[in-house]
Amino acid sequence: MARLIPDKAKSKNEIYRGMTLTDLIIGTIAFLMIVFVAISALPLKLLIILAVIVITVLLLIRIDMQPNYIYVLHFLRHFVLNHRFARDVSDEILLDRKESKKKAFGELFTEEENAASAQEQALRQEELNRLLSDPNVSEEVKEKIRQHRAAEESRLAQNAPHATEDKMKCTPVEQLCAFTDISDDYIVYSNQYYGAVLELPIVEFGIFNKEQRSQMIENGFGKLLRSLTAEYCTNIVKLERPIKYTDYIQREQGRMERLKAAFDEGRLTEVELQACASILYDRIPSAQEPCFEDNVIVPFYYIVLFDGDRFRLENQISNAIQLLNEVQLPAKRLGNKELAVFLKYSNYLDFDEAQIEQIEQRDYAAWAMPQSVHIRAKHVEINQIVTHNLRTVAYPVSAEDAWLAEVFAIPSTKCVVKCKPMEQDKAIRAINISLQDLHCQLVNTKAEAKKANLQAKIDELSALLETLKLENEALSEVNAYITAYDIPATEEKQKKAYRSDLPRLPMIKKTVRRAFKHRDIRLNNMDFDQMYAFIGAQVSGYDPLQKSAHGIPVSSLAAGAPWIYTGISGFGDMLPNKSEDVSAVINSFSREEQEDEGATVVLAEPMIEEGDMTEIIVAMEPEKNEAISEDVATREECSGETLAEDHQTAEE
């Protein structure tokens, strides 16, 4: 189903389509300068006039929907703002604090230690000077002292740039990150407002019909967005995280316990128990390996709601969970520890999330903040990892369901969509502008097929306008921020290999821009404006570029559904390979509500050796015995040969 997205509404200082009051002022100043130069007696008047014209044109030209004079202002502002931010304490200090280790706290007093060592160095230099001036000291000893000093001076000269950089004043990173505490399952933002996070499950649109998709969009996420207040921005967040099969391992162990209970009750023979147990014992190590050694990185999706009152926010969360459960989107609310891990993953990937068990709750917020942030002109270095921060500035006129899924699934990226309900007058004005543009295109078009397409869009937008006036639909002010983690650029900058679980995509910035452009979504590089791009990409109810947000109907935004998984996986499934598009074992028995037949095992690529398909079917152990004809676990008499034959039949 095609979803319409109206063009961007006029800004307050926009006079005509694409022309702002600032453009008019710059053009007027340039015209007056040309007139004054033309009537003056200055030499080389023609060259001066040409220079003024060229400069004016360059300033007014737009790149990524933004005039160049804005880039000039951003360039000047970039050198005024603070660029370097750092955390006062490291993760090691926070880890040791819970065990009351005094050794780690010594890092807080390095300045005093350095001062003491400097005094010792001064006394030592005085002693060496005395030896050099003493005539009783042999020339051999004096020569050794001179050589030692020369080597020391050479070492200091080599380390001077690094020493200078280390001594630069860094602003506390707390001034850059909005959250200040994590308590009672809420993210606290300076005691001004609170945030709560819902983790969304993977959705496979391929097994839903059109009615189910429409119900999920309109009655689920769309209804949720329409019920929110306009005080803070709702965040739709996509993060890259490693899969942890802890729950999966526990389910496998639970199956093993149920098999033992069935054997004790006489419902399983010893041969059947051994056959099933051997399969489960083989599968548990397979699930443990990616948890500790070879991480599998996949996208995770979240909805973050904000409010200044905890009671109202609690009601919003309860309502959201109920709405999503009704449309088969069982959302999970994150607790304190999960919130800390979520916030840390929002800026950084290469850490052990099990560290949270060794952190005191009062230190959750500090631990979740990045260790260092360096804002540069065209990128941001987060914990010394080069990241490119971009923002969407234009959207397609129409889009299909799940139109954000493909671009949000790009590896090594973080995506944050900030949406806020738009005022009704502003929303109606945005629709009227889109209708005017479509009418102009219709008048200037001669092709009948294109005319029919434009007329259909006009009819749909007109219907949308009527629903807006009746308050049955709403528009959201939307900004989408994309952070691309550039591991090759990080290695090039550090001049050494960087160990990271993130994939190493060459020219990731171009790759991201190309993927979004393929979906008719334009991105702004945010050059010299990386500070605001970084702040916008943080999980908070504040959007620094809210004034330039794009108005999108709630139904179209909900239809974006970025949590639609590009591969196939779900509860009880496994992805034993690093790539989500290769090798997947599907537990289809968890999908019996969506499928007519549940007895299916899907393999994305050949990863299972011959004969192992039977083991996978048995290991799934469906809850309902009818999913496999004559469930093996309930048969009283079954020899090893008969069991193998039944397995072969199930495989066929």
Image (cartoon, rainbow, N blue to C red):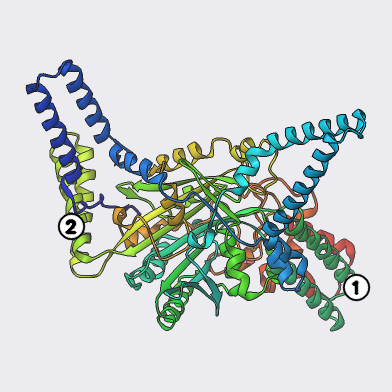
The answer, for residue 248, to whether it is visible in the render is no
Element on which disc 2 rests: helix
Identify residue type, mark 2. Answer: Arg
Name the foreground residue: 575 vs 416. 416
- Please tell me how crowded label 1 is: few (under 14), some (14-19), or many (20+) other residues with Cα within 10 Å: some
Q: Residue at x 50, y 38 (%)?
A: 511
Which residue has dot 2 on it?
Answer: 429
- Residue 536 drawn at (x, y percent): 43, 56
Q: Which mark is residue 270?
A: 1
Q: Nearer the viewer, mark 1 or mark 2?
A: 2
- Residue 292 drawn at (x, y percent): 76, 58
Q: Which mark is residue 596?
A: none
In the rendered image, which quarter is residue 42 located in? top left
Q: Residue at x 62, y 71 (%)?
A: 363
Name the foreground residue: 206 vs 525. 525
Name the foreground residue: 600 vs 467. 467
Name the foreground residue: 587 vs 170. 170
Q: Is residue 604 left or right of residue 274?
A: left
Q: Residue at x 50, y 69 (%)?
A: 329
**Mark earlier in primary sequence (1, 2):** 1
- Residue 629 drawn at (x, y percent): 71, 68
Q: Is residue 11 left or right of residue 562?
A: left
User: From mark 1 to mark 2, how far is it between C-alphas?
Assistant: 74 Å
Q: Is residue 464 left or right of residue 231?
A: left
Identify residue type, mark 1. Answer: Glu
